[in-house]
Image (spheres, grey):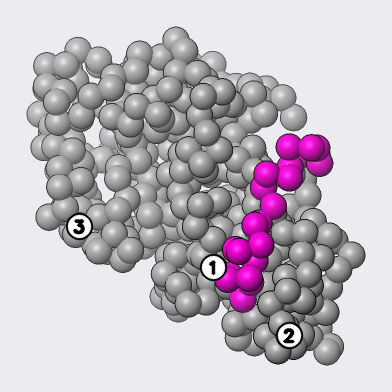
Amino acid sequence: MGRGAGCRRMAPLRVLELYSGIGGMHQALKDSCISAEVVAAVDVNTLANEVYKHNFPSTPLWAKTIEGISLKEFDRLSFDMILMSPPCQPFTRIGLQGDVSDPRTKSFLYILDILPRLQKLPKYILLENVKGFESSSARNELLKTLETCGFKCQEFLLSPTCLGIPNSRLRYFLIARLHPMPFSFQAPGEILTKFPDQDLKDLIKDKVADKLDEASSSLLSKEKNLDPSVGPDCSSKKNLPKGAFLFKLETAEEMERKHSQDNDSSIQMLKDFLEEDNEEMSQYFLPPKSLLRYAFLLDIVKPTCRRSTCFTKGYGHYVEGTGSVLQTAVDVQLESVFKCIEMIPEEEKLMKLSILKLRYFTPREIANLHGFPPEFGFPDKVTIKQRYRLLGNSLNVRVVAKLISFLLG
């Protein structure tokens, strides 16, 4: 389907993109078909800025800290919308949850200080962050500031699976608009876990789902690399197939959840997002050392699976808990490889594991799962490891594009 079809006609919005990274927000803005112009993108990451310039060469890119931008400079931009994805480390348990005391939140708190003092308030704001931000002091400060300025807000916890994409990446989102009327779908004080145009049941955040979200599973259960749930809709208790074999370090519940996800026909198969095999693919196969050391911790998926765990910035470098790996030998059953594997000699073990032909997803495939279009690329000088890192810090373009449509709807 061609991008740009059916775009709305309106006076172009002037958009300020903060913490712009590789340009996920900019791409989402393009895909939302809103008439808009990014008047400035701001980020201090040199490498991310190179990728941004490569894809959006005509956008003014400010390689400076946000707190280094004066109120006058902000006023001069006269922006109608802010898109931002502040540093997430202060709000994750892996990042020690420093919250507002973490130096990395300094720039975000500066934005909250500047906002009420602008000559002209923006009409729209969209913020993305990790699961965990919703229980932070920074979020409370944000809501307080927005309310004082007269914004109507709605919060979400959404994963790409909501749009039929086979990747779990649960993230916090906030949309806010300067309007006397609330959103038609607004649920004051609640966090929505689906898009407003989806089935209304389970829209309100299910407290039980907190135990199953990716933050506590994929990223934090270091000893198991559990498969992350994407919300209350993915925890249905279907029976395991007859004779199912529990291998690796999985519980019956985890196996059930994976089986349930792989049978959810509303989600696409991974094969729709994969590159064609070529001679360059050999560099992505897991080395023998990794196979032997991490075999029991890997989240292994086939092209016909309808799920994959969250790809983090350490993918391709660290094996454990950084994202799923692909089994390219599709006719081999995992059970036949893992059964009694711990009892055989190392050399034989390696031979068995090699049969699976396990490889990392390529950066292009991860970009596909994140919703970046085929024409989105990286400068040649950006290494594969750097591409993984940049994509791990990015966002799902399709999720944000849909939220932008709701924000302006």
Q: Closest to the observer: 280 or 378?
A: 280
Can you name the residue that lies furthest to the right here? 331
Q: Closest to the observer: 131 or 180?
A: 131
Q: CA distance from mark 2 to mark 1?
A: 31 Å
- Crowdedness near tag 1: few (<14), some (14–19) or many (≥20) residues, C-alpha within 10 Å: many
Residue tagged by mark 2?
Answer: 344
Residue tagged by mark 1?
Answer: 228
Label 2 is placed on what type of residue? Ile
Counting from the top left corner in percent of width and height, residue 214 is at: 48, 65
Q: Is residue 75 above or below residue 342?
A: above
Question: Going by the image, does 399 lie left or right of 337?
Answer: left
Q: Quadrant of the N terminus?
A: top right
Which of the two labelled residues, at mark 3 and mark 2, occupies the earlier sequence position? 3
Residue 407 seen: yes
Q: What's the magenta region?
A: 275-296
Identify the residue at image location x=72%, y=70%. Answer: 350
The kind of secondary structure element at disc 2 is loop
Counting from the top left corner in percent of width and height, residue 276 is at: 80, 39
Q: CA distance from mark 3 to mark 2?
A: 48 Å
Label 1 is placed on what type of residue? Pro
- Crowdedness near tag 2: few (<14), some (14–19) or many (≥20) residues, C-alpha within 10 Å: few
The kind of secondary structure element at disc 1 is loop
The kind of secondary structure element at disc 3 is helix
**Does the magenta-highlighted stretch encompass residue 69?**
no
Residue tagged by mark 3?
Answer: 99
